[in-house]
């Protein structure tokens, strides 16, 4: 899967991006017509100099000079207006492409972490920004102006074949420079992308673990790793900039040398009576204009390569994340959950973590999942909520596999509190309502009350309108967890799954959690709780025990816990070195894992 999302490997047709570009064909036709008019108007300076040198100066006619100056000024103004319109059209093409692809890009951003672990899931957004930025830059104008190079060369040949050949040779030299730019800069751009991704990933890791780095004195040591990658990135960027600047300078010098060469050829022709003085200046301006698109393309080559790489990368990602189908809207589940021979592996892996899991729960059941760390508990519930795609088996609600629902429709019937809780930037009310604009105040307060968090929320500075910030900034971990529970209970979903919901709760919070779980069962829902602390199982009637990725036992809570927590001989007491103090060793490690 990782190779499938590579930077240059093409997999499948790039239909979506091409379709988005094709939707703007009317704008491109208009840009092409404007480019035609512009390239004709670019002859203004050449022919003005030709007329001044060959007509005005020999005749000494001031009225002719004034008339020509007025006409040329009007043509230049017209040229400026058309150039502005062309640039604005290109900017709007970039915006239009973004508007057609941004929803699919968002879909890719949210799906990538569930499909693979080897790619920065935010990269599609940056790729789309790069494509949009390039379309709005001067780069595409070179594409529309390049076809007019032969037109200018024909006029140069019309002045004299020697002038035409001089301009043609100069053009070939610039084309060779452009090819060198392509060959030498491609690997540098790709290397810069890879190093940039590594640095960004490391920076995000440091940001999330800033407290650990500071408290344990690891900042300087791990900072060396970041510095090493950053230095490599800076070197790659410097080489790329040096290459672009060097080839750009060579192209400018070549164009200036070409202008001088054309002047020299023109002067020679004038001396030999084969051309007029006006042709010298006109041909110099014209040859420079003929090669300007090539020089512009060389100057924009780095952005062109970046846009092309982003195009290929985004196309590959979109081709592996198809447009989700809209299945028939099934009735809301009300009866049972069935897990059948379920085998689960992490995204982009074929190594199962959960193997052949099967169990069934009916409306009103509460299941506590217990087991030691790395036994597959969290992986199992990730598959049940549809976050991970199973390698084998099925998860069914009222007999229908969960993949028969669209994610949006399935989410209505599921409440999920993950182990690593994240609140989104917004208000407490918005987070509880899952950012559903149609949510009413009564529904939000009902969910908060069911989670036992209403009183806590109203004591916040702005109540339900308190801004949470990124990841719930400004709220304690326990407060965020309780708000996450209210979000899971919003609009009374049939299936509620909580992964270690009491890991950061105090006694009051645990009591509210127990009441909330009992309330779900009482109204006919199904509750699944992954628990390490027995207090989370108070409201459950069933227990599922896992070990090494397999279900070891499933049944009545009292029966299963009676076996798991069976008494064992007490360990001997260990005396503390402090006078009068003693320390007891827990006698059953399986009780802790429950």
Image (tube, helix red, strand yellow):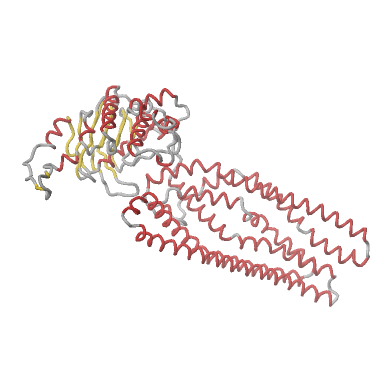
Q: Is residue 531 above or below residue 512?
A: below
Image position, residue 269 (x, y; %): 81, 75
Whole-percent x, y for residue 419 in the image: 31, 40
- Check the image and report above or below for 415 versus 31: above
Where is residue 485 shown, x and y percent of the image?
A: 34, 32
**Is 395 positioned to the left or the right of 252 in the image?**
left
Number of marks drawn: 0
Is 579 left or right of 196, judged from the image as shown? left
Q: Is residue 417 positioned above or below 452 on the image? A: below
Pick whichever, 187 or 324, lies toward us.
187
Is residue 160 shown left or right of residue 445?
Answer: right
Residue 493: name its quadrant: top left
Q: Position of residue 406 (x, y in %)?
A: 41, 34
Q: Is residue 440 left or right of residue 143?
A: left
Considering depth in this image, is 252 or 153 the residue closer to the camera?
252
Q: Is residue 434 visible?
A: no
Q: Residue placed at 67% from the left, 60% from the top? A: 293
Q: Is residue 50 above or below residue 132?
A: below
> Quick check: can you spot residue 421?
yes
The quadrant of the rendering that contains the C terminus is top left
Residue in view at x 48 percent, y 44 percent: 105
Q: Quadrant of residue 492?
A: top left
At a point 42% along the width and 51% down the height, the residue shown is 120
């Amino acid at each position: 899967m990782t190779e499938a999302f590579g930077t240059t490997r093409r997999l499948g047709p790039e239909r979506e991006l091409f379709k988005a570009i094709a939707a703007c064909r009317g704008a491109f036709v208009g840009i092409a017509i404007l480019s035609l008019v512009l390239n004709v108007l670019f002859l203004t300076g050449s022919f003005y100099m030709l007329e001044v040198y060959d007509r005005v100066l020999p005749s000494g006619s001031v009225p002719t000079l004034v008339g020509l100056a007025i006409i040329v000024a009007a043509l230049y103004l017209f040229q400026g207006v058309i150039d502005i319109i062309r640039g604005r059209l290109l900017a709007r093409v970039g915006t239009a492409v973004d508007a057609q692809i941004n929803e699919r890009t968002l879909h890719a951003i949210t799906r990538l972490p569930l499909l693979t672990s080897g790619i920065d899931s935010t990269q599609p957004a940056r790729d789309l920004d790069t494509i949009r930025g390039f379309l709005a830059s001067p780069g595409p104008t070179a594409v529309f102006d390049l076809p007019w190079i032969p037109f200018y060369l024909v006029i140069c040949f019309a002045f004299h074949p020697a002038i035409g050949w001089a301009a043609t040779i100069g053009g070939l030299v610039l084309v060779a420079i452009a090819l060198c730019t392509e060959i030498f800069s491609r690997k540098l751009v790709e290397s810069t992308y890879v190093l940039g991704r590594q640095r960004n990933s490391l920076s995000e890791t440091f940001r999330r673990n800033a407290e650990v780095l500071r408290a344990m004195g690891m900042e300087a040591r791990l900072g060396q790793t970041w510095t090493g990658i950053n230095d490599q990135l800076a070197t790659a960027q410097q080489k790329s900039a040096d290459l672009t600047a060097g080839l750009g300078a060579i192209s400018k010098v070549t164009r200036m040398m070409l202008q001088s060469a054309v002047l020299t050829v023109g002067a020679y022709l004038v001396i030999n009576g084969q051309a007029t003085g006006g042709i010298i200046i006109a041909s110099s301006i014209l040859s420079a204009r003929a090669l300007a698109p090539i020089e512009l393309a060389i100057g924009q080559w780095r952005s062109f390569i970046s846009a092309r790489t982003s195009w290929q990368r985004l196309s590959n990602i979109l081709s592996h994340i198809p447009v989700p189908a809209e299945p028939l809207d099934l009735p809301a589940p009300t009866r049972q959950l069935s897990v059948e021979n379920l085998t689960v592996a992490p995204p982009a892996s074929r190594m199962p973590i959960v193997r052949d899991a099967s169990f069934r729960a009916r409306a009103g059941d509460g299941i506590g999942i217990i087991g030691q760390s790395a036994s597959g508990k969290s992986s199992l519930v990730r598959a049940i909520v549809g976050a991970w795609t199973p390698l084998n088996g099925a998860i069914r609600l009222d007999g229908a596999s969960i993949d028969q629902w669209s994610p949006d429709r399935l989410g209505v019937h599921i409440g999920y509190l993950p182990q690593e809780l994240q609140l989104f930037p917004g208000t407490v009310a918005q987070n509880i309502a899952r950012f559903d604009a149609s949510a009413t105040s009564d529904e939000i307060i009902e969910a908060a009350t069911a989670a036992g968090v209403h009183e806590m929320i109203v004591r916040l500075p702005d109540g339900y309108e308190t801004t949470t910030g990124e990841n719930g900034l400004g709220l304690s971990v326990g407060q965020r967890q309780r708000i996450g529970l209210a979000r899971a209970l919003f609009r009374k979903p049939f299936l509620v799954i909580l992964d270690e919901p009491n890991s950061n709760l105090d006694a009051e919070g645990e009591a509210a959690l127990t009441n909330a779980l009992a309330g779900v069962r009482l109204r006919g829902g199904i509750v699944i709780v992954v628990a390490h602390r027995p207090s989370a199982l108070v409201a459950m009637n069933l227990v599922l025990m896992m070990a090494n990725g397999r279900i070891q036992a499933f049944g009545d809570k009292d029966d299963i816990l009676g076996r798991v927590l069976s008494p064992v001989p007490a360990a001997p007491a260990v005396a503390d070195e402090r006078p009068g103090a003693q320390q007891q060793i827990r006698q059953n490690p399986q009780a802790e894992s429950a």
